[in-house]
Image (spheres, rainbow, N blue to C red):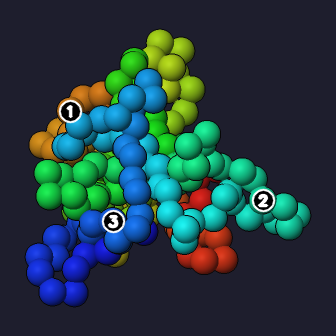
Amino acid sequence: IASNPLDGERRRGSVGRAYDGVELKILGPDGAPVPDGEVGQLYVRSPYVNAGYWQADGTIRPNVDAEGYFDTEDLVVRDAQGYLSIVGRAKDLIISGGLNIYPREVENALEAVAGIAEAAVVGVPHPDYGEAVLAVAVAGPGGVPEADAVQAALAESLTGYKRPKRIEFVDALPRNEMGKVLKR
């Protein structure tokens, strides 16, 4: 649906601009379009797009709205030049105390900390905030880093509500057959 151009500006971290013939709308939680620079859910309309998601039982789960736009379930930001950046999946969004937390942002911050090789972040129930951030991480070659050092490093790049309330270290993150991290 989108690509960085072969000739022209290629932006790191962006999936590029929509192909010709692909219509996009980016909607907020209220169903209204969001302005460029804000996060919203991506909907796509094109003759190249499926009507839904293929299921294991051979059926298709419809995922098209009344206007014929396919709900990608991706959260994106579009800049003023039309370049799209994916910030996460709608189902992975963590809402803590009414504030949105995008797991990929927290995972990137964790993976920048010395001693953390890989991380996955999920929302877990919290009695006061609805959800809290739980991180599951794989330690680097030097072993599990000190908790205080990890939290101090995260404090430099993440506001308080985005920092994990708990970090659990495991030998490896669970993955599916395609290598994607399973967050169940």
Q: Amino acid at mark 2?
A: Ile
Q: Nearer the viewer, residue 47 or 95?
A: 47
Q: Tell me which amino acid carries mark 3.
A: Ala
Task: Identify which residue is drawn at 47% across, 49% down.
Answer: 43
Q: Which mark is residue 178?
A: none
Residue 15 sits above or below residue 39 on the image: below
Q: Which mark is residue 60?
A: 2
The location of residue 109, given as percent across then percent down, is: 25, 53
Q: Residues within 10 Å of mark 2 (few under 14, many from 20)?
A: few
Among the 4 quarters of the image, the one containing residue 99: top left
Q: Residue 54, relative to residue 107: is it above or below?
A: below
Badge 3 marks a residue whose secondary structure is: strand
User: Distance between the Cα atoms at labels 3 and 1?
Assistant: 32 Å
Report the quarter where the N terminus lies.
bottom left
Residue nearer the viewer, 9 or 95: 9
Q: Earlier in the sequence, mark 1 or mark 2?
A: 2
Q: Which residue is mark 1?
A: 159
Say which residue label 3 marks.
18
Q: Amino acid at mark 1?
A: Thr
Spot occupied by residue 125 in the image (x, y as percentages of width and height): 56, 26
Q: Residue furthest right?
A: 57
Question: Where 129 sits versus 119, above or below?
Answer: above
Q: Residue at x 61, y 39 (%)?
A: 66
Q: Say which element carries label 1.
A: loop
Q: Nearer the viewer, residue 172 or 49?
A: 49
Dot 3 crowding, Cα within 10 Å, few <14, some 14–19, many 20+: some
Q: Verify CB contact (< 8 Å) between mark 1 and mark 2.
A: no
